[in-house]
Image (cartoon, rainbow, N blue to C red):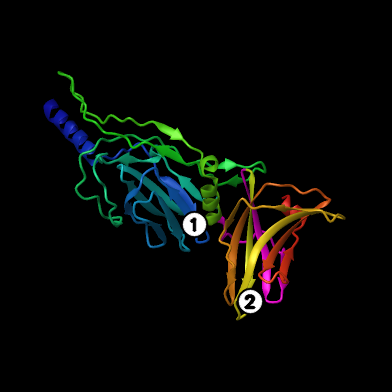
Amino acid sequence: MISKYLKHVLFVLLLSIQMGYAHSGEPITIALNESNIITLIFPAPILNVVEPSSDYMFSHEQQSNMGVLKASKTKHLSNLTITTNDGYIYSFVLDPSKDVTNFVYVLTVSNAVGRINVSPNATVKPASSVQANNTIENPSPAISEPAPNVKPVLTTNNAGSTQPTSQLVSVTTPEVTENTRPEGHSTVPVAVENQPVHDIDLYTSEPQTYYSIFCENIHIEKPTIKNVSRKVGVLELRLNDITLDKNEMYFSLQILNESGKAYSVKDMEFFVMSKGSKKQFKIEPLHVYNFRNDLGENSEVNAVYVLKNIRLSEKQQMFIILEGLDHDRYIMLSPPNDVINR
């Protein structure tokens, strides 16, 4: 009786090892809605995707370790499972919510819920997405590896509001080697990993990439600033939002052409001038996202300008100038100081 019981336990153990899934990890919950775009960055290229329900869409380029997640208007939860070409499996719960505070998720292997064995020397080609009721075909025997439940971090700015952060972690692909079982030892061989992890701050190492990712996730947000606009003829310039993150200010600006004629503009410039003085100094943007010179008929442009964080005194005033190609026509917007300093 005991012998049969031990055989049954050993069979279950070996079966779980071949499946290669670790059960100690938990899925990461992602809050999103139809107004947001969520970016997922993995430490290795994406291999397989178990698609969520039709209310959600996950897209990525082949051989890329970054994907974009979108949602339609829905009240239903869904799940998303992604396997990278180093064998790690990431699980997500998609939660429709009005309150979205994190727009960029940078994953490490510690976020994985399990792993399938993928030889580091084998050439792995991305496979097409599979439906939720399918399984990975012909998996190689793998070792179940527990993964701690570590979730992407949110940082808080000085004003106390939560902002998305993007801290990129570079991971050396683990090497799986076969252990030699000592004589008389009854344990099952396990995978040995050489897995040094080096934290690299994307904000410090590649600030332009960081700015671009951040801008991509806020440029379609609903306006939080109202009645800060200027219209000249059929062209209008609006300040829709100012987002603070780390040491920068993200100015979300909208340019509208309300005519049936196409127009061209030259540039957007930022100046600060002291009241009662003709002296002014120009503020050079650190990054410009989605600005274009050609305004098609009945069109709009949603651009984001990244500036160093500044605070204006009572005697200072900021001016945002949209300049035309002929240098004669321009739109000048002067946001109130309480909007800039909020």
Q: Mark 2 against mark 1, which lies toward the viewer?
A: 2
The numbered dot on residue 72 is none
- Identify the residue at horizontal 51%, vertical 49% (top origin): 209
Looking at the image, tell me whether mark 2 or mark 1 is earlier in sequence order: 1
Amino acid of disc 2: Glu
Is 234 part of what is drawn in magenta? yes
Q: Give the extent of the magenta segment.
A: 218-246
Pointer 2 local density, CA inside 10 Å: few below 14, some 14–19, many at least 20 = some
Position in image of residue 324 (x %, y %): 67, 69
Depicted 161 relative to depicted 53: above or below: above
Position in image of residue 330 (x %, y %): 71, 69
Is 21 part of what is drawn in magenta? no
Location of residue 114 by image quarter: top left
Pointer 1 local density, CA inside 10 Å: few below 14, some 14–19, many at least 20 = some
Residue that mark 2 sits on: 258
**Where the N terminus falls, by quadrant?**
top left
Amino acid of disc 1: Ile
318 horizontally vs 63: left or right: right
Position in image of residue 55 (x %, y %): 41, 62
- Identify the residue at horizontal 59%, vertical 72% (top origin): 295
Residue found farthest to the top: 184
Say if residue 25 shows up in the picture: yes
247 horizontally vs 42: left or right: right
The numbered dot on residue 37 is 1
310 horizontally vs 278: left or right: left
